[in-house]
Amino acid sequence: MTTFTINGKTVAVDLRAGTTLLDYLREHGFFSVKYGSDKGETGSDSVLVDGKSMNASLMLIHTLNGKNVETVESFAHGREVHPLQDTFIEEGAIQCGYCTPGMILAIESLARENELPSEEDVKDVLAGVYCRCTGYVKPVKAAMHYLIAKNGDTR
Ligand code: FES
């Protein structure tokens, strides 16, 4: 039995060996977490595990005992979105949206570990999330607006 927390709710699971966190999340309706590849290169399978951005497709469920998992589903409350999601909307940083949850989690992970991240830091974390639509310009701009509003000017 493996016990961990997803978006504030404790779950206990007893699943077959080899079940990944991505398998579990998709089977339980956490559709913000997406399949990109079996090797995690795309970042579309990103989740936060104990506050750090990780690839759900590379995490076996039995390794999660006692861990805290967050997905983008926990960021919005009804029609009220997280300030980072709001800046993505305001900046027009979302096109098809396939990559957007991974980008949001990568930036939030950075914001939690570094109070004064630079634009280069943002570009570094977003390099782990493939986007075929935006060219990254607007997501980087949205991230910087969010980080500056949260922490003050980091430049
Ligand atoms: S918005 Fe389409 S892949 Fe990023």
Image (spheres, grey):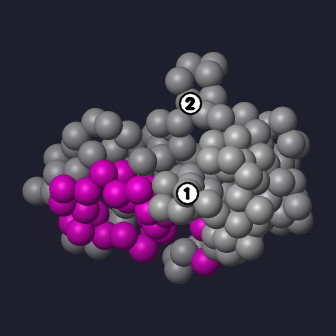
* Vertical side of 12 occupied by 56: above or below: below
Residues under numbered marks 1 and 2 in contact, where contact means CB atoms less than 8 Å apart: no
Q: Position of residue 27 (x, y in %)?
A: 41, 48
What residue appears at the point 46 percent right and 67 percent down from the top-left corner? 54
Is 99 included in the stretch rendered in magenta? no
Q: CA distance from mark 1 to mark 2?
A: 22 Å
* Element type at mark 2: loop
Residue for point 36% across, 51% down: 69
Magenta span covers which residues?
A: 41-69
- Which of label 1 and label 2 is nearer to you? 1
Q: Amino acid at mark 1?
A: Glu
Looking at the image, is mark 1 or mark 2 earlier in the sequence?
Answer: 2
Near-viewer residue (6 or 123)? 123
Q: Which residue is mark 1?
A: 115
Residue 50 sits inside the magenta stretch: yes
Q: At which x and y percent is residue 116? A: 61, 60
Mark 1 neighbour class, 10 Å CA radius: few under 14, some 14 to 19, many 20 or more:
some
Name the image quarter holding the N terminus. bottom left
Height in image: 105 above or below 56? above
**Residue at the (63%, 29%) spot, across then down:** 81
Q: Name the residue furthest left.
A: 1
Q: Is residue 102 left or right of residue 24?
A: right
Which residue appears farthest toward the top when viewing the image? Answer: 79
Q: Position of residue 43 (x, y in %)?
A: 60, 67
Q: Which mark, residue 76?
A: 2
Residue depicted at 42% across the width and 48% down the height: 70
Q: Quadrant of the C terminus?
A: bottom right
Q: Is residue 38 left or right of residue 49?
A: right
